[in-house]
Amino acid sequence: MVWHAQLALALALASPVTAWCSGKSDACSSNPIPLRKFNELNFHADTCNLKWNLGCTSLNKHGALQQKPPPYPLCNSGHQPSGVLPVDAYTLALQDNTFAPGSANWTLHGLWPGSAGGSGGQNQPYGCLHGEEFDETVLKTFDSMLKYFWPTNPHFNNTMQCFILSEWMKHGTCAVIPGRADGTAFRLSQEDYFRTAFVMANEVNENLALRNRLLLGEVKVEEVEPLISTRCVQCAYLATEGWTDTDVASVPRMSADCLDQCFECGDFWDTCPPAQLESTVMLDPSNAPRNEMPSASINGNASFPVLEFAMPAFVSSDNTSPWEGTWRSFGAEQGGSGKFEFAQTFTDNVLTVTTDSPYPRTCTYEQRGTKELLLRCGDDHLEGCLVQRLPDVGELEAAFLACNHTGEPAPASFYAAMDIQGCGNFLMFRCKASAADCSFSPDAISASKPETEIKTEPLSNSKPSLVSHFQPGIAGATPSLLGSWRSLQVSSDYEKGLGQWSFTADGQASLRWPNYPSRAVERYSVSHSPEDPSLVLLASASGTITTCRFQFQYHPVYSYAVLDCETAVDNEENTQKTKWAMGRCNPCSAHCRYSCGPENNFCGHGSCDPAESLEAAPVDALPSPSDDTRIEDYDHDWCTPEDASCWPTETAIRKLEQELDPTLPRLGLQWDKYPTPQPAPVPKGSFNDQSFYGLGSAPHGVKALYYYEDIAEMQRPCFNPSGFHPPFDEWNAASDMCKAAVHQNEYRNWNPFIVVFPLNERHVVAALNFAVRHRLCIATAGTGHEYNSRNSCPTGGILIRTILLKDKKFISTWDEDSTLAPAGAFRFGAGSTFAEMHAFSKDYSRVIASGWCSTVGMVGFHLGGGHGPFAPSMGLGVDNVLEIEVLQIGHDKYGQPVIHKKIASRSQNPQLFWAMRGGGGSVWGVILSMTIRAHEVPNGGLSRVYMQQNGTFCQDSSKYGYQWLPDMWNRFTAWQLSLNQKVSTQPGFFIEPKDYKTTGDLCSVTWNFTFEYFYAGGQAEPDYIRFRDGLRDVLQTETVTETNFKSVYDYLVSDTMPPSKFSLIPLNPLPAEHPPSDNATGSQNSVFVSRQALETKFASTMMDVLDICVKTLKKPDDTSPSGDKYRCGFHYLYTSLTGNLGSTQPGDTAISPGFRSAVMLWNARTLTTKQAEETVYKLGPNSYFSESSYVMHNWTTRYWGEKAYEQLLGVKKANDPGNHFWCHHCVGDNPADAYGKPLGAATQAGSGEQPDAATQEEFVKAEKL
Ligand SMILES: Cc1cc2nc3c(=O)[nH]c(=O)nc-3n(C[C@H](O)[C@H](O)[C@H](O)COP(=O)(O)OP(=O)(O)OC[C@H]3O[C@@H](n4cnc5c(N)ncnc54)[C@H](O)[C@@H]3O)c2cc1C
């Protein structure tokens, strides 16, 4: 019978002391909820509080004795009695004992059940079932243990009785733990509660590993209050079984088998495995957690039942050790070569280690307790070992052996062993006796000959089969199979033993033989059955299909599995069977701490929990971008300032601030002028040329975080557009918050609520944890160069500003593949600007294929594509990235968010690596560093050429007038088309119409064509001379500036690069009366121009665009966001891509095909969407993600193309399953929203944001073209 029903019955029988409660005090008697019964001995109905029986008194203000003031209510203010909250975890409150001599070093303050729905600082449910009287004999019975483990701290001015009574009444009455194997709740009795607490306290004092984890490495603090899981308390309870003594020496130790559970909670609720144990369950002994295993399991051949969260409890047996016999094994520690296989035979207190172990030896052992061995090898070498049976997998038994070679005691647990340096850990397997044809006997190893010769092919012949190779099922491995597995073939043939299976997220598998490098690497493409993910199909390059059954044992630290395969041979008449026993570190625990190596760093690819593996959406099963369901399917759930349940409080913000080490100096943004490289861009007009308007200047530097105390301020523009005219004092006077958030454009007044300046990875993790806890939309930024507000969220949210991550390192040999980077590589922190990177590369006589602007940041440039002065000869930004280090938010086995780090490179997380090279900014996680290819300085150095020409819009045939331009554009086109890979250009065509208003004469409208280009080589080279003279003819000028540099940094510090050259202009180019619309598209309309389009359409299109300008001069366009109402912006015409003759165009990045092969990028300002569709967009289907308009229809197609977008979205979902990272017109944003509408805003008629019907029709037509 459930408790409620019993209580109802009790109430029906109505004792006279029954009372009702609805509030904290007098109103208690009117509580309408019939769920509680009070015990008059302990409860004051009038105060709804405890009645203190013994000594719980204090002096009132008149000096009279009074009952201690109620420390907590036993009634909730609402309608819920406090006793019905579920328990999620416990707080183990421990005090550093400096007050009770002779007691334990760490004493208990309490063992407090906690609940997400509880109250107070610890979210505790108070006084559950407070009708249960405190048994004061407990004080007597446990006197010595209470004094030793639970003394009252004089600081609380309390009596022992009062302290312990209140601990029970307040907390102990709520203590429930998982009961029987099905996890049903079990409430602890008073005796059990105290005994359990003593076991916990004793373990903390005895067990260094536990203490170090729970007590933060014994930092000197008075009290620590770590969270522990309900399973950990269950583990302590299990130790109390059969324990009846009451003296300190008799307190039993917790079993290592379940002690691991104590480490599962991080700092916060959401990292504890949720238990959700109803705290009102009856105290029912039959529901007690099961400690004993079925008797059959004592026999080593029996199956061990799997506990949901734990390794199975170890069998206590006086008879045979369940591990006795022979096992085959491999190393299961962090790191290690993975090249050794072993056989361990345990007999009669002798352990013999054989096979190819470098340490073949025979040791004697003494058994200590159920799972601890003391090994004696040779005369005096002692090792403490933990040996533990694990649940069976497939037809194999499994066990774990961990020996502390250092002579230290045996590791306390499986979990701890993984963490101990110098601890030899082995994952051991053997056949079950019942498995008839299982041949895995090490005894036969040395005698056996290989059954068949193993086929070897030269490595070069072994190519991966294509993912698209026809196979039934879902492409890719089921998530639990992902990663790199140390594997033993289940065979009596020793040479077939040790292999390494790797399953990657892009559907590839490989099998390597660590001890036989000459053996071919076998490669397969992988699929799995949609109905049964454990059925895995491997297709070889020759088309042979191997069918495998994958059986998996998940553990939060280390998982193991069996892969049981069958391949058809001899025209499918026969089959060849192979079976693998495999183990790998499980990276899906918080921070991926236990990933043995980067090969298993695949966090985020869904959960490792087999139960969830079906949920992972395969990339190729995603609906197309036009499918609206996808938008809902991947929606966000960010907190808004209106939602007090999640929006961060001042206290939470202060806590985050502490985690960011606020006292550490953050001075890296101050700039001392060249030759010091610029650490960040200087906003236009900033005093003393300081970045962030001097916010980070000495002596204080930037703060660890900034936030808006007033939300209304957050929703106002930071930089008033009217300020975009000298003097800029107004901007310099902006709030610190605005300065901290400063970025190029501020569309729609989306400002971050909090800006943090991390100094290291730990700080970024803290910021991400904070963001997850408060469900904040996360934006990232370094320099703030991004044009389209991609570093701000619509709901405020958090901005993680990585500008202070400035590490730099030269890597002379890129080991992963030195042919990719023959001149080595540079690893730079995410806050690096090109100025800093060039200054550093100069020291190594190297060049980085940067952008044109020295203050552009490395990260945004490389994510978007990256064109620049060396791209035609050295590749685009995306072609030069070798590795990216990124922090992401995945989820663990329990579906809880965890922060983890990933390395993306050609060999690790290759899909993510592909997506992050061209897939755009912000949405993949927070990047910590990038490794970029270094290039030798070209022979002859770097030559810069600068020319310019000026003219007017005079309509007559005067030289340099409007009629002179068409021919100039034709000459320009021919010259551009002749360029080879050595030349990279940056021509800018600027129109100045300001005098037209007063003169009304087109001759007063001027143009200025500035032409800068780089030649990768010396000035004496014939090509150099040819191109220079050719451009002179194009511009019809004699004036040329020519300079030669040994390094790019020399160019930056030359007078051709003043600090203000590329300043940040934090303006909103769409002032309030012009919100983003088809008339005010923001930033620039860009198009990649192919060789053919350049040749056939460019010159005439340019004149069409200039005609638009002329038209608006004559008849100003009121819809123009430009102050003068003209549409006469400027045009950049970069030939700094990879479309030049002789440039290479690698096909392994996510940039669009139009970008890949384009010869020119045209960035045009101030056109309407319609005008762009009719002119520039007709030159090519693709636009540049990093330089494009804020308003864009069909943006997924223009940036990437439909197919590539589908793939990008698949990668995004796999890597950011919670959709925490967002930005406008980035992967994951709403493909149907051209305008970046404010969230939830209904379309307003006449707002100008939506095209009218006629225009809409035009779009449809244009998009079809
Ligand atoms: C003056 C100027 C000159 C330019 N010149 C060129 C050029 O020559 N060639 C060219 O190709 N482009 C050029 N651009 C465009 C430039 O490449 C993009 O604006 C680019 O996004 C800037 O990157 P950033 O890191 O400096 O800017 P930010 O605004 O700091 O960031 C840009 C994007 O990267 C993301 N991001 C930044 N840091 C991180 C991080 N640590 N983790 C995850 N995401 C992050 C941001 O969220 C944002 O989406 C120029 C832009 C300007 C303003």
Image (cartoon, rainbow, N blue to C red):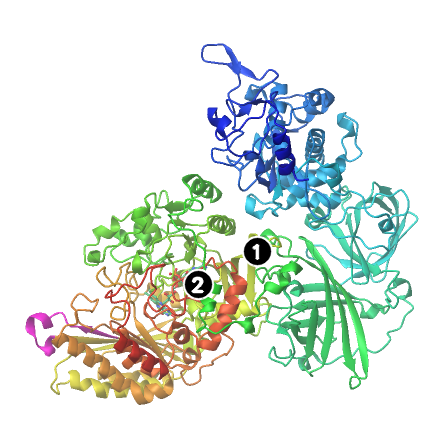
Residue visible at 49% across and 10% down? 64
User: Is 1009 in the magenta?
Assistant: no
The image shows residue 1014 at horizontal and vertical percentages of: 35, 76
Q: Label 2 neighbourhood size at 10 Å, few (<14), some (14-19), many (20+)?
A: many
The 10 Å Cα crowd at callout 1, few under 14, some 14 to 19, many 20 or more, is: many
Secondary element at tag 1:
strand
Q: Is mark 2 within 8 Å of ligand 1?
A: yes
Determine the CA span between mark 1 and mark 2. Answer: 25 Å
User: Which of the 4 image quadrants contains residue 1080?
Assistant: bottom left
Q: In the image, which residues are magenta?
A: 989-1004
Nearest the eye: 731 or 1170? 1170
Q: Position of residue 391 (x, y in %)?
A: 77, 54
The residue most toward the top is 63
Badge 2 amino acid: Val
Which quadrant, please, contains the C terminus? bottom left
Q: Is residue 15 above or below residue 523?
A: above
Q: Indicate which quadrant contains ligand 1.
A: bottom left
The residue drawn where x is 30% and y is 79% is 1257
Instruction: Say whether residue 890 is left or right of residue 571.
Output: left
| Mark 1 touches mark 2? (CB < 8 Å) | no
Of 421 and 791, nearer the camera is 791
Residue position for label 1: 891
Closer to viewer: mark 1 or mark 2: 1
x, y percentage for residue 1130?
Answer: 24, 73
In magenta segment, residue 997: yes
Residue bearing the label numbered 2: 859
Rendering coords of residue 289 (x, y %)? 73, 42
Q: What amino acid is found at the position of numbered circle 1 in the picture?
A: His
Is residue 702 visible in the rendered image? The answer is no
Residue 762 position (above or below residue 121): below
In the picture, measured across the screen, residue 1153 lies left or right of residue 88, that is left
State which quarter of the image contains the N terminus: top right
